[in-house]
Amino acid sequence: MTSTDPAGASPPAWAVQHTLCLPSEDAARQAASELAALGHRLVAVRAHDHFRSDPSSFWYGKPSLDPELTGWWQVFSLAVHTGHERRALEPFLRSERIRIAGLARSHGGFHQGCAEGHATTLQQVFSRGGLVHKHPTAEVAPPTPLPTDPAPPGRGPRWTGLAPGGPDGGPEDVVRAVVAVAERMYGSAEDAPDSVGWLLEEDFAFGEPYETTGAFLGDLADAVAHQGTCTDDTVEAVPFLAGLAGDGGLPARVRVIVLCDLLRLSATGPSLAASAADRIAALGGAWQEPAAVRMTRRAIGRALPGLLARWGEESDAVRFTLAALAAAVSEDIPAGLVAAASGPPAGAAALAASTPADAPTALPATAPAGAAAGLATTAPAGAPATHATKAPVGAPTALAPHLADRLNELPAPAGSPRADTLALISALLDDDETRLATALHRLTSWRPALAERTATPHAAPRQVALAVLPDLVREDVGPALHP
C-alpha cells in the first residue's frame, strides 16, 4: 500500500530519528559514518549531556539525568522514507531498528531509542549541533516489494463462563464485592495499605459511581502500581489482589483481569532487564533489579499456592491465566510452600485451608515477624536460615509436574496462538532452555514484533519470554472479557 489518496498522491515523507550511545568519540564517529552510508539524511555526534556545559541551555550546570553515561558520546541520525503510509512501513521500520541496534552493539554501545514523525517536521527540529553528515535529499528506500507481517494463526476456541451477568450486572456489583473483600481483610481504611485504603473511605462510598467495571478496575490497578511502577505500596497490596483473584464471590472475568494485573507485575523485572540488556552489556554491569520489583514478585509467589488450590473450581480462562502466573513466579515461591504448590490437589486444598488467598500475609509459619522487610536486601553474612525466602533452583521443576497434565486439559488446538503460549508456559515451568528457544522461535514466526527482543544476544531467553507473556495472555482472554 503506497497511498489511500483517491487522487493518487503519495503520502507525506516519513522520518525516524535514532539515538545511539557509544563509549568514545571515535566509536561515535565511526557509527555516524556507517549511518550516513546507509542513507541517513542528517547525522550529528555530541558528547553525552553536552547541554549541561552550554550556558544558553536550560540544563546548564544541572545534575546529569543519567550519570552512568558520563564520558560517553551520542549519535543522532535522521532517516527519511518516502512513498508509503506509516502503517505499511512498520515491518521495514522494525527491521531497521534491529539493524541499527546491531550497528550500535558492534561499536560497543547501544540503541537508546527513536522518535518518528513527518519528515518535514523532524528535519526542522533536528538539532544541528555536532553535525557531521548532511545529505539534503538522502533517503533510506524500503525494498520492493515492501515486506509485510505474516497473518497470525487462527485463535483457539472462545473462552466460556466469562460473559457479564449474574453478580456482574453492572459496575456497582463489582465495586461492592471488591469493597467487601477489603473490609473483610482490613476492617477500616486506617488499617489498610495506602493503595487499598481509599476503597474504605467515606469519600469513595459517597462519590460519583463508575460508569464501567473496566474504569473501576483500571483505577484500582493504577492505585496499586501507578503507571505500572512497583513501589512499597505495591508490595503491601499484593495480598489484597490475591484475595480478589481467589474470591469466588467476584465474577470470573473480573478475577481474570486481576490475575492479568498480577501477571504483569510479576513480569516487570524480566521486562525491564530484557529492554535494558544492550545497555547493561555495553556498560559492563549486571542487572540490578529494583527492590520493590523483586519484593512484589516474591509477594505474588507467596500467594500463588493458595490461588492454585482453587484450580478445580475455576473456569478454563482462569486456569490459563493462573498457569502463566505460576510460570512467572515459579522461582520465587518460598521453599516451605513449593511442596504444597506442587503436590496433589488434596494437599493444595489443605494448604488453602491454612493459608487463604486473602490473608494479609502468606509467609511460612516459621518466618520471623520481620521477614518481609528482609526481602529487599541481601542477607548479611551469618544470617539465620530463616531469612531465605526464595525457592531453590529446582523449584520450577518441582512445580511443573503438578501443572503439566492440567495444561494439557486446556482447549488449545495445535498451531493456535494459545497452544504456542502454553508451550512457552510449559518451558518456563520446566526451566527447559531448548524448549524455551523453540517456543520463542515459533512465536516470532507469527508475532514479528518479538524479533526486536530476541535479536540482541544480551537478553536471556527467560527474560524475553516473561516480558512477552502478559501480552500473550491478555490478548488471548481479552475478547472473552470484553464481548
Image (spheres, rainbow, N blue to C red):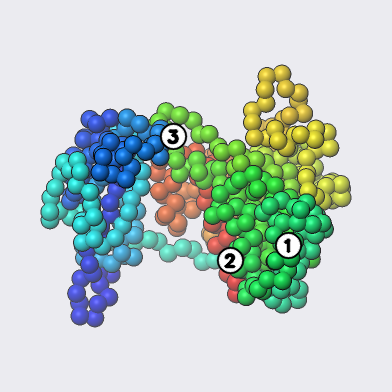
Is 297 above or below relative to 214? above
Give the x, y percent position of residue 267: 58, 47
Circle 3 sits on which residue?
280
Q: Where 252 sits versus 15, above or below?
A: below
Q: Is residue 361 visible?
A: yes
Residue 105 in view in this figure: no
Amino acid type of the residue that numbered disc 1 sits on in the rendered structure: Glu
Residue identifier under label 1: 201
Q: Are marks 3 and 2 in contact (CB under 8 Å)?
A: no
- In this view, the residue in front, 294 or 179, is 179
Q: Residue at x 74, y 47 (%)?
A: 303
Please name the residue that numbered disc 2 is placed on.
478
Local secondary structure at mark 3: helix
Give the mark, 1 or 3, whose residue is nearer the N terminus. 1
Mark 3, mark 2: which one is toward the viewer?
3
Amino acid on which the number 2 mark rests in the picture: Gly
Q: Quadrant of residue 470?
A: bottom right
Task: Specify the quadrant that holds the N terminus.
Answer: bottom left
Query: Depth-wise, is mark 2 or mark 1 nearer the camera?
Result: 1
Kindly identify which numbered label has been placed on residue 131: none
Type of amino acid at the residue the image marks with label 3: Ile
Residue at x 86%, y 47% (from the top left corner):
354
Task: Specify whether 424 is left or right of 259.
Answer: left
Question: Label 3 near label 1: C-beta < 8 Å?
Answer: no
**Image quadrant containing the C terminus:** bottom right
Q: What is the CA distance from the residue labelled 3 to the residue labelled 2?
A: 34 Å
- The quarter of the picture where residue 296 lies is top right
Residue found farthest to the top: 382
